[in-house]
Image (cartoon, rainbow, N blue to C red):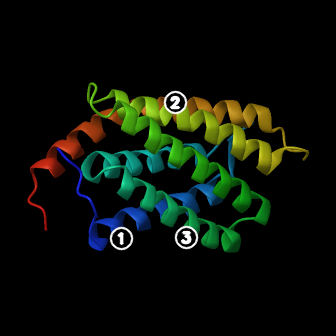
Amino acid sequence: MTPPADPKPPALLPAALAMAGIVLLSNVLVQHPINPWLTWGAFSYPVAYFVNDVCNRLAGPMLARRVAWIGFATGLAFSCVFAPLRIAIASGSAFLVSQLLDVAVFNRLRRQSWWKAPFFGSVSASIIDTAIFFGLAFGGTSVPWLPLAAGDLGVKLFMAVALLPPYRVLIGRLQRAPIA
């Protein structure tokens, strides 16, 4: 499937809103630990890679990058209101770098087996996101962030595998759906 040269705004809006919502939700949930090595944000944030990968598969890297930039700006703005500034900045930085990395890795692997692009894009982006976010958000504070980062990364890697079946089903259905 050849991605369209210029995705229409209606295709952009739902994905960008979903991305912004995921960032906001994750920034709030990361402030609530489950145990000494895990926060609730670890479960919501990997869905951002899922959204990005669906956009990339269906409409190409141009739309996926637009969604990442819009999600970044909107998520950062809302996060500055609902999360501490340090978390908002750390999240925005980690989000943008990791999402653009996900787009690049996905695009390099897009012609290989259906699962490789979303899996390896999510894994590489998750590692970078975790390092940037936890280092900026909690480095130099009294928060024991290394165990949180390890737990967070473990969940992200688990989610990279767990989201493959829904990705496969959704892509199959959306590719068969008539384009509006």
How busy is the neighbourhood of tag 2: few (under 14 within 10 Å), some, or many (20 plus)? some
Residue at horizontal 66 percent and vertical 39 percent from the top: 130
Give the SS element for disc 1: helix
Q: Confirm or deny contact between disc 2 and disc 1 (CB under 8 A).
A: no
Earlier sequence position, callout 3 versus callout 2: 3
Occupied quadrant, residue 112: top left
Image x and y of residue 13, in percent? 36, 70
Q: Amino acid at mark 2?
A: Leu
Question: In the structure shown, which secondary structural element does the residue marked by tag 2 occupy?
Answer: helix
CA distance separating discs 1 and 3: 12 Å
Q: Nearer the viewer, mark 3 or mark 2?
A: 3
Query: 159 above or below 52?
Result: above
Quarter-wise, where is residue 113 in the image? top left
Q: Residue furthest front?
A: 5
Residue 39 against residue 55 in the figure, above or below: above
Badge 3 amino acid: Thr
Q: Is residue 153 above or below residue 53?
A: above
Residue drawn where x is 28% and y is 34% of the image: 165
Q: Is residue 39 left or right of residue 141?
A: left
Q: Is residue 138 visible from the viewing direction of this image? A: yes
- Circle 3 residues within 10 Å: few <14, some 14–19, many ≥20: some
Q: Which residue is mark 2?
A: 157
Alpha carbon separation for disc pair 3 and 2:
26 Å
Residue occupied by mark 3: 74
Residue linked to disc 1: 13
Q: Position of residue 12 (x, y in %)?
A: 34, 66
